[in-house]
Amino acid sequence: MEAYDPRTVFSSIDQSGRYAYGNQPGIAVWNLARLAEALLPLFDADEQCAIEQATEVIERFAGRYQAEWLAVMRAKLGLAHEHEADGELIEALLQALYSGRADFTLSFRRLADCAASPSADQALLEQFRVSDAIQAWLPRWRERLAAEEQPLEAAAARMRAVNPLYIPRNHLVEQAITAAVEEDDFKPFETLQAVLARPFEEQPGYERYAQPAAPHERVVRTFCGT
């Protein structure tokens, strides 16, 4: 996923968006339920009792997932402590990313730079086709960050440690596969592998590996065979 959209789906066999990015939590619960059905005989000899035990465990998932999701997103925003309004702050950012068609990975990485200095805001805004929402959101985030009472450089460093600069973007993976299959050239794969081994570190000379696909490079469908 490059431009943030919870409806993002790539699988060639997923025609309805069942496994879209935003549907992942629900699909995880569905998968756990199917696994539990297969394991029911191991829970209890009494089927009804086994179902009750499995259901009790599965029903914990939603709350546990939400807590873990909030923890991850707080870390991505440089927040070390919990606040009751954090969920709303995070959702507002995601909405800004969506309305602005901003690259998910690079936006968080640029946000880390913004934590250290407002002079970095322009590089973040350049990720957005429409920047009104993110400009309105930034002061809210900075106010929340200030409440942490921590040096801003320390917050920025922590953010860079959890927000990757390099990810296995679909077009780069496709290029590596094509070179290997059609030309017996594994160098693109080996280079990509080396860059991805250090996803959080700036690697001069490999800037293109951090960039979204150009229009002619975009991959909109992937296949199990890859």
Image (cartoon, rainbow, N blue to C red):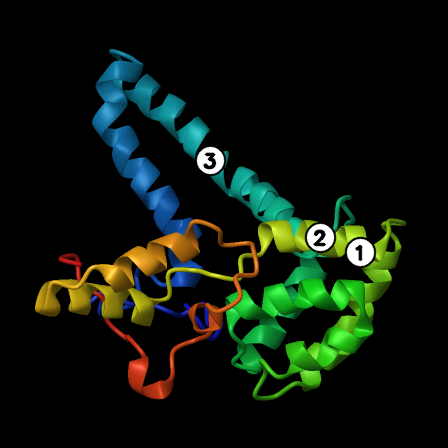
On screen, residue 19 versus residue 105, left or right, reads: left
Where does label 2 land, which residue?
157
Question: Nearest the camera: 119 or 72?
Answer: 119
Which label number is shown at residue 59? Answer: 3
What residue is drawn where x is 43% and y is 68%?
Answer: 209
Query: How far apart are the two marked residues, 3 and 1, measured between alpha carbons?
Result: 40 Å
The percent coordinates of residue 105 (x first, y second) are: 52, 65
Q: Residue 153 has which mark?
A: 1
Provide residue 98's location: percent of width, then percent of height. Answer: 54, 76
> Residue extending furthest top?
45
Which one is earlier in the sequence, the residue at label 2 or at label 3? 3
Question: Hey, what amino acid is under mark 1?
Answer: Glu
Q: Is residue 151 above or below residue 17?
A: above
**Looking at the image, do the residues carrying marks 1 and 2 touch, with CB atoms under 8 Å apart?**
yes
- Depicted 52 relative to depicted 135: above or below: above
Q: 108 and 183: which one is in front?
A: 183
